[in-house]
Image (tube, rainbow, N blue to C red):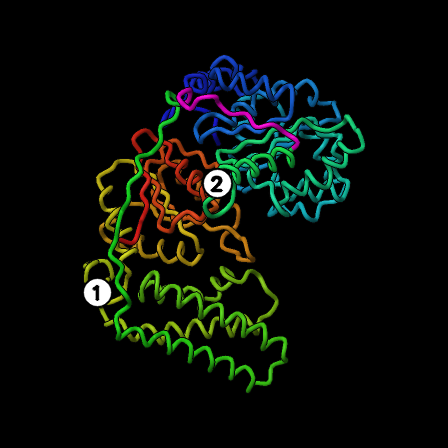
Amino acid sequence: MDTGKPAGATSDGEQKLRKLRKVVGSDEPPLEPESFARSYQLEALEKAKKENTIIFLDTGAGKTLIAVMLLRSYAHCIRKPSKYIAVFLVPTVVLVQQQAEVLELHTDLKVGRFWGEMGVDFWNLNTWMEKLEMFEVFVMTPQILLNNLRHTFFKLEQIKLLVFDECHHARGKDPYACIMMEFYHPHIRSSSINVPRILGMTASITNTKGSNSPADYGKQISDLENLMHSKVYTVANESVLADYISFPNARIKQYNHLDIPDKLSLLFVHLEALKVKHVEDLRDLKFDPSTVNSSNKKISKLRDTFLFCLKELGLWLTIKACESLSNEDHATIFWGQSNDKIGEKIIRKFSHDSFTLLSKNVPAGWCIGDDLKADVEAGYLTAKVSCLVRSLLEYRMVQNLRCIVFVQRVVTAIVLQSLLSQLKELSGWGIQYMAGNRCGLQSQTRNQQMGIVDAFRDGKVNIIVATQILEEGLDVQSCNLVVRFDPAENVCSFIQSRGRARMQGSDYLILVKR
């Protein structure tokens, strides 16, 4: 969320609003955001009232408050018994809860929140008709709206205001892009006047990898404007934002990479041999070809995962990955729910055998983390992991630490959380991991993820090791440290992850091989 509060603080207007609600109750009309909005937010609001607009402002500049004020201007059109609604789209389930709470705080509209795990894929027309009678604002992930439009449970002409949070996702086959291409643009071509007002919001107008020339950026902006049928709004001069946004202090943490010790390099050969043995065992047991082929692919993927861990994280964390995946309860972390019980058993056996193979190379009684230098020299941890631990130890005396460590892979998040949680020097800190379910991976339920975020806000969790699921939109004003364990994949990822460090004087650490 990005309501435009000064970094590390709650805005005066919101403080007044919370006090008012405590005194008079939540049924009373909320304070008007216009009374504490900034000049550029009011300017953006007026533009958004007149035409479809993409709000392009830095994290912390208050894009969400602009959306709130625009929604309030449409309240008379959508308030029951009106048949019209407003839809607020967000790319992740974590943001559904967060943005819905903001809308309820700043408006008296009836706000509904929807995401996949609620079972919405199985709802019929009657169920959605009940929801349309019940709510005036629908906060949801975009695939739900796209499915509803395709099944005609919703009609585009019902929607008066359509908000796209983190609208830089609108490209290719993303649901944001499909909503515009399959439904909005055909209405425009048919000269229909019954189309919703479009409001897009983003802190990074481009979303591609690699370096780009000014001409490339110009084309990306033009393409987004055309797709969203909108015009970009931003401040004329960034100095306007200087009094409101506090960027974190960027710090480079360098480490000296060490190759895996010679005595452990044979483990690469042993893991390959183990993989071949398991595939041959499948054929000897005369499983049908489809089972053999499917299991072979999964074993190969597991082998690659363990090799990645050996190179990038060290032997000890590779053993942790094997241990986790040999557990029946954890096998679905990487493969999702499956009816292929034979395949699951084979996967767990390969993980267990890999665990046994690798564990023989760590002396009994070795206490990981007691001597980081020795851990690295032995190959049990990599220099990169040691750098992360040492960097976190620098903040051991910081009161109320709120830290997000960003990684690229699910397995990295899981095993790093396991390591950090058992280090004596980090005891007392609550440490969790969060990972999404892209590419068929199933890591955590949505309720678990929202529970972790709530605990992070409340201070019960101090460190979250997370994949890109937390890069966008998460608003924890007290977050005072962000660490990029793995580099950002693109400029958008860099801007988004940096923006999670919201507190005044916060740090943004980037781990780099010397």
**Image height of 324 relative to 23, above or below:** below
Residue for point 48% across, 15% down:
39
Q: Which residue in the structure is indicated by mark 1?
A: 377
Q: Residue furthest top?
A: 35
Q: Is residue 186 magenta?
A: no
Q: Is residue 238 magenta?
A: yes
Residue 257, x across and y down, in percent: 27, 59
Helix, strand or loop at label 2? It is loop
Which residue is more in the foreground, 144 or 197? 197
**Range of the magenta residues?**
229-241
- Residue 253 lies, in percent from the top left, at 27, 47
Tag shown at residue 213: 2
| C-alpha span from label 2 to label 1 | 43 Å
504 or 97: nearer the eye? 504
User: Which three-letter amino acid code belongs to the residue tagged 2?
Assistant: Ser
Q: Position of residue 338 (x, y in %)?
A: 59, 64
Q: Looking at the image, which residue sits at the far right?
A: 190
Q: Is residue 413 above or below residue 241?
A: below
Residue visible at 33% across and 34% down in the picture = 248
Image: 338 above or below 58: below
Q: Are marks 2 and 1 in contact (CB under 8 Å)?
A: no
